[in-house]
Image: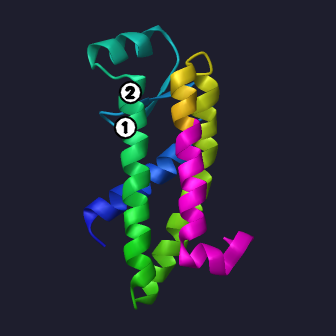
Amino acid sequence: MDIINKEVISKLKFLSKIQIGDKINTKYTAIQNDNMFTSLSRFFWQDSRVKTIVFIQETIKKAFELIYVFEKSDKISEHILCVNLIKDLKDCKTGLNNLKETYAFDLKFTCDIETILQIIDSKLAETKLEREAGDNL
């Protein structure tokens, strides 16, 4: 598995760990607590909710690209990775819901997150392994 694939998996796991009140530093893929330092650093590094949405969308998009490739593979290891990716996508929904709570005052951001959550659910329903395993994943 190449470094890009590992990075996608790592980012999904990262997203699943986000708690209410956390903000994402997209440049360093790090969690920032909501305080004055975070506000200053986000301004200085020009990090924003828009960059956060793009970070999430790109991560989810790449995860599904990997799922579609691994799903068609004859390698057992890639099928296992596919199952793990499906689980990680399900798990990251918790972090996305926590981000939605953090930015509850921003209607556009919360709608973007809700849309991403719906896309995850609908695309998961399309995956062969998800259909076969049902809720056992």
Q: Name the residue at the bottom extreme.
A: 74
- Asked if one can make out residue 122 in the rendered structure from this viewpoint, the answer is yes
**Amino acid type, callout 2:** Val
The numbered mark at residue 17 is none
Dot 2 lies on which element?
helix
Q: Which image quarter: residue 133?
A: bottom right
Magenta stretch: dominant SS? helix
Taking the spot 37% from the left edge, 40% from the top edge, the residue there is 55
In depth, the one of 33 and 121 nearer the eye is 121
Residue 44 located left or right of residue 122? left
- Asked if one can make out residue 88 in the rendered structure from this viewpoint, the answer is no
Q: Decide: few, some or many residues near mark 2? Use Cα within 10 Å; few <14, some 14-19, many ≥20.
A: few
Q: Decide: is 84 above or below 14.
A: below
In depth, the one of 62 and 80 nearer the eye is 62
Report, in whole angstroms, how far the alpha carbon at label 2 lies from the one at label 1: 6 Å
**Amino acid type, callout 1:** Val
Q: Which residue is mark 2?
A: 50
Q: Do the numbered discs 2 and 1 sit on residues whose CB atoms are within 8 Å?
A: yes
Taking the spot 39% from the left edge, 54% from the top edge, the residue there is 61
Q: Which residue is mark 1?
A: 54
> What is the x, y in percent for residue 36?
46, 8
